[in-house]
Image (tube, rainbow, N blue to C red):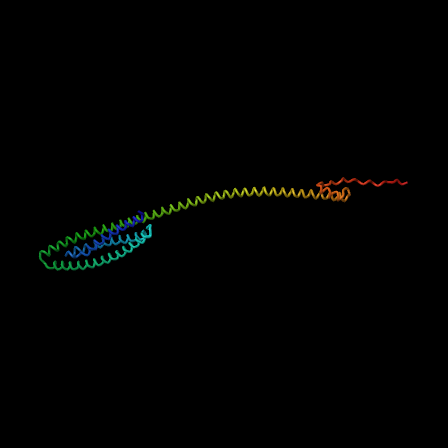
């Protein structure tokens, strides 16, 4: 059985016991004054009302405890049943309050009648009246002492009930704090794993960045070498073209020879320049 369901069942048992106790107190209050002892029964009425008030407070606390538990039941049907039980408890509580009020009114009426009968008997005179007066004085002293003791016990019981409720609230707070801490620990573990994965991704990105830089550097170097090669080849062809042009202009090679040799894949080398003979020098006669 679920813990919440078990707690609701325990509350129902406590409710039935408290209702039985309160009904006994109400029955005792209703019977006050019917025994013909108005003074004695009037002194016991506050004690009975105190017990009834304690039972009412306990019933009210049971309702307050059932209200949050009814919402935490595992199934929807059980939740509805718990709410219906809470409504029936409230109705029963109101009926018991009305019965207690009517019982007090009835007890006060009975006590007044019994007191009037005792007053008439005491004022009648005779030995029976004297004995009756002495018994009443003795019983009144004993009743007052018993009432003081009962009041002390009632106050002690109320203090104990308050301490128990405070302890229960403290335990509930501790349980809630424990659940919060466990939830925080679970979230921390989740964040920790996420941080580890993030760290791994950052390391992979750093390695990829280094690799990309190396590739870019090697590519740039190769590109620069190719450019230098192309430029050097281009400069060599221009030099060769200039030399051929100079050779053609000097007449050491004809343009047709250059075209023929180019078609056969042979580039003619320009002929070395032969210095022209110096003009003859004639001696003057």
Q: Nearer the viewer, residue 126 or 109?
A: 109
283 sits to left or right of 98:
right
**Residue 5 location (% of width, % of height):** 30, 49
Q: Position of residue 32 (x, y in %)?
A: 18, 56
Residue 215, compared with residue 91, is above or below; it is: above
Name, please, the residue furthest toward the left: 126
* 221 to the left or right of 69: right
Front-lying residue, 72 or 39: 72
The part of the image, by quadrant, that contains residue 53 is bottom left
262 on left or right of 104: right
Q: Position of residue 2 (x, y in %)?
A: 31, 47
Q: Which image quadrant: the C terminus?
A: top right
Q: How many marks?
A: 0
Please provide percent x and percent y for residue 43: 18, 55
Q: Residue furthest right?
A: 285
- Left or right, 211 with reference to 50: right
Q: Is residue 113 above or below residue 146?
A: below
- Between 223 and 182, the one lying in front of the other is 223
């Amino acid at each position: 059985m679920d813990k919440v369901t078990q707690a609701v069942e325990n509350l129902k048992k406590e409710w039935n016991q408290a209702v039985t106790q309160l009904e006994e107190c109400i029955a005792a209050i209703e019977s006050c004054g019917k025994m013909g002892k108005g003074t004695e029964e009037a002194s016991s009425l506050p004690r009975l009302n105190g017990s009834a008030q304690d039972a009412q407070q306990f019933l009210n606390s049971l309702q307050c405890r059932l209200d949050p538990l009814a919402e935490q039941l595992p199934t929807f049907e059980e939740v509805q049943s718990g709410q219906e039980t809470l409504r029936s408890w409230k109705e029963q509580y109101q009926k018991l309050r009305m019965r207690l009020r009517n019982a007090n009114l009835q007890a006060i009426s009975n006590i007044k009648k019994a007191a009037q009968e005792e007053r008439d008997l005491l004022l009648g005179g005779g030995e029976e009246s004297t004995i009756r007066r002495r018994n009443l004085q003795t019983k009144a002293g004993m009743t007052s002492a018993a009432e003081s003791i009962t009041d002390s016990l009632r106050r002690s019981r109320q203090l104990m009930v308050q301490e128990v409720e405070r302890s229960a609230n403290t335990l509930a707070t501790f349980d809630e704090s424990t659940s919060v801490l466990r939830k925080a620990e679970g979230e921390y573990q989740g964040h920790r794993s996420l941080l580890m994965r993030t760290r791994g991704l950052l390391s992979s990105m750093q390695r990829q960045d280094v690799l990309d830089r190396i590739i870019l550097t090697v590519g740039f170097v190769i590109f620069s070498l190719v450019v230098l090669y192309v430029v050097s080849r281009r400069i060599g062809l221009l030099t060769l073209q200039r030399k051929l042009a100079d050779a053609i202009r000097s007449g050491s090679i004809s343009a047709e020879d250059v075209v023929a040799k180019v078609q056969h894949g042979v580039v003619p080398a320009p002929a070395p320049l032969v210095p022209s003979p110096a003009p003859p020098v004639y001696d003057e006669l």
